[in-house]
Image: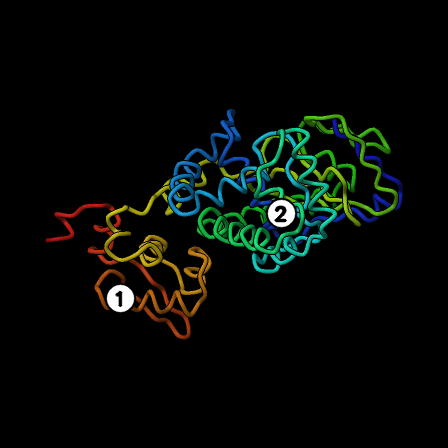
Amino acid sequence: MLRIHFTSEDLARTRIATEPDVLWEMLLSMHMAQAGATGPAAADFLLWRSAVRPRLTAEIPHRAVLLGKLAPPTGYSADFLTPTAGSADIDSAVDAVLATPRHRLGRDIGRLAVTRGPVDSRLARLAEGDTEALGALGQGLRAYHRLALAPYWQHVTRQIAADRAERMAALAEGGTERLLLGLHPAARWEPPVLSLAYPLSQDLFLDGRGVTLVPSFFCWGTPITLREPGAVPVLVHPIARRTGWMDGDLLGRTVPAPLVTLVGRTRAQVLHAVIHGCGTGELAQRVGISNASASQHATVLRHAGLIVTRRSGNTVHHSPTALGRALLDGDAPRAAR
């Protein structure tokens, strides 16, 4: 059970994060990618897992293993992976992780050793603040984001924004009490303590700092917090995801391996990302590349007859041609015709 102790100052300083926290989404999606989770919430991610896990295995096997050791699917995950400042920008977020003081690296990895047994040499070097180990961690985080989150980020942000709007309405209509009780069906508010189901017994005393509520797309089950909260404690809680969020969308599709061999992985991902049409900025966001790079890849694919670009004023809209769709479907005979 997690018991959060409020004062009147804490109630006044309780706030809802204004944007998704990319590091919390990364951490919780890592749990989901590894875990043999069951139940209605986990079922929402089955298609996502089936699409993402082969990518991670194929492209970043060693880095994925490192991240899995820092963020195992159950129990304690290293707190330094989720600095409480929060950011929706991957570069700023990774920089914040890599700026973790050495004593915190050692403390958090030491906690992993208590629950998971002796750490391997890579984690030991990371605990010491080794520059090469930190560089490998940064590369792993960026690669994971590109493969597992960037293609879906628009959907994540859209659903989190909808959830935040509902909670702001609850706050306006029923005050902080209704807001807190709405965090989970089993939440209990017995002033001044909010009690939530939790895998371990933990008391969080806010002591006038307030708490930032962070709606999370990949959080499932119950809300989660850090073992040791920072200057302003955070409580990450699941949103009410739209059922079937991957059905009938590009998210349920995977890039065919022969297409990757033919045009290269990034260009194949660009073709895959425009399956239902999008602009250059959204394309860049889905694939995890710059706008300039997205425009360049789209130009090459357009010249090859795989996509068509329509302009309306200052905006463009990319979509696949019949040939592009045939290649995405892995239909070689139809593509040849």
Position in image of residue 299 (x %, y %): 30, 69
Q: Which mark is residue 243?
A: none
User: Where the N terminus falls, by quadrant?
Assistant: top right
Q: Is residue 76 left or right of residue 14?
A: left
Can you name the residue that lies furthest to the bottom here? 313
Q: Which residue is mark 2?
A: 126
SS assignment at label 1: helix
Q: Nearer the viewer, mark 2 or mark 1?
A: 2
Chain-order first, disc 2 or disc 1: 2
Q: Residue at 69%, 37% (x, y): give it.
A: 110
Can you name the residue that lies furthest to the left here? 337
Q: Does 82 appear above or below 240?
A: below
Amino acid bearing label 2 = Leu
Q: Is residue 38 left or right of residue 235?
A: left
- Say which of 73 and 234 sits in front: 73
Position in image of residue 41 (x %, y %): 53, 30
- Would you call the spot at circle 2 few (<14 residues within 10 Å), some (14-19), or many (20 or more)? many
> Quarter of the image holding residue 279?
bottom left
Position in image of residue 196 (x %, y %): 72, 29
